[in-house]
Amino acid sequence: MGKNSRAWGWPSFAAAAFCLLAAPAEGLTGRSPSGAPEAVEQLEPVEVTAVRIAPPTRPLPLPLPDVSTATPLPPDGIGLGLPSEGRGPVVPQPPRLLRDETATTLGGRTRVHYLESIRPPYPRRAREMGWQGTVVLRVEVKSDGTVGAVAVRQTSGHATLDEAALTAVKGWRFAPPTDGEFSFSTVVDVPVRFDLKEQQLHPSDGQGS
């Protein structure tokens, strides 16, 4: 009887110890059940306007190719922001900061705003094709007002316009948000709106004198 009880007890003890080690420990998952991501502030849209220009015309008529068997191309800008090798574009996320609520009570907290925002040039190709749209950029504003990481949050539908906005915003400067006497980094959404206007002819154009 004693031998059987000893032989049965050791495997049971080992199985119980294995279950305890395999069970996940509470509070070590790294996720806060009550922690919600902070809302990202969206700044005022930046307007980029230009006059639409007529595309260049060919002086000689050319025969049109047979497109009955051609494979249609994807629309402009469809490949922007697609995952590369299983990984998507790096989108800046708002930092989680411990802030002093005294600054809010005394009115000592400020929000981010533009300081130097040179509007991007309207791409000539887009003006010829009549491309318009609004691209929303997710921009990391550092504590010194310079721009960190930038990503396309919402595409305009045209890669040419998105690239023009991305290139321009990297050289912008912002007034960073402050909490009392301290400035800190943050993440904001910056809409850049490309808008074309039809070219208006002078009343005398096309009329004889």
Image (cartoon, helix red, strand yellow):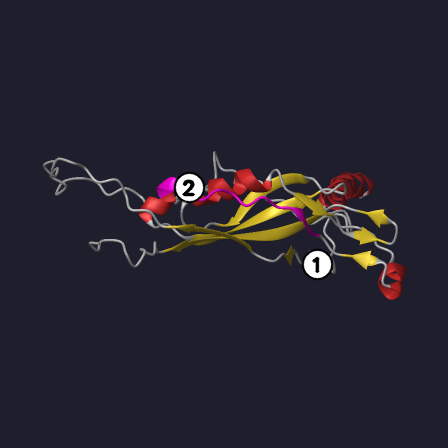
Q: In which quarter of the image is residue 17?
A: top right
Q: Nearer the viewer, residue 17 or 119?
A: 119
Q: Which residue is drawn at 54% across and 45% down?
A: 119
Residue pointed to by mark 1: 36
| Residue 111 located left or right of residue 207 | right
The quadrant of the rendering that contains the C terminus is bottom left
Residue 106 picture location, percent across and down: 89, 64
Q: Which of 88 and 154 is in front in this view?
A: 154
- For marks 2 and 1, the one nearer the N-term is 1
Specify the farthest residue to the bottom: 105
Could you say whether the residue bearing mark 2 is in a helix, strand or loop?
Answer: loop
The quadrant of the rendering that contains the N terminus is top right
Amino acid under label 1?
Answer: Ala
Could you say whether the residue bearing mark 1 is in a helix, strand or loop?
Answer: loop
Q: Is residue 119 magenta?
A: yes
Q: Which residues are the magenta region? A: 113-125
Specify the farthest residue to the front: 209
Distance, label 2 to label 1, CA atoms, is 40 Å
Q: Report the mark closest to the observer, 2 or 1.
A: 2
Q: In which quarter of the image is residue 5?
A: top right
Q: Residue at x 36, y 41 (%)?
A: 125
Residue 93 picture location, percent across and down: 65, 47
Residue 88 picture location, percent across and down: 52, 41
Residue pointed to by mark 2: 123
| Residue 98 located left or right of residue 127 | right
Instruction: Decide if residue 63 is in sight here.
Output: yes
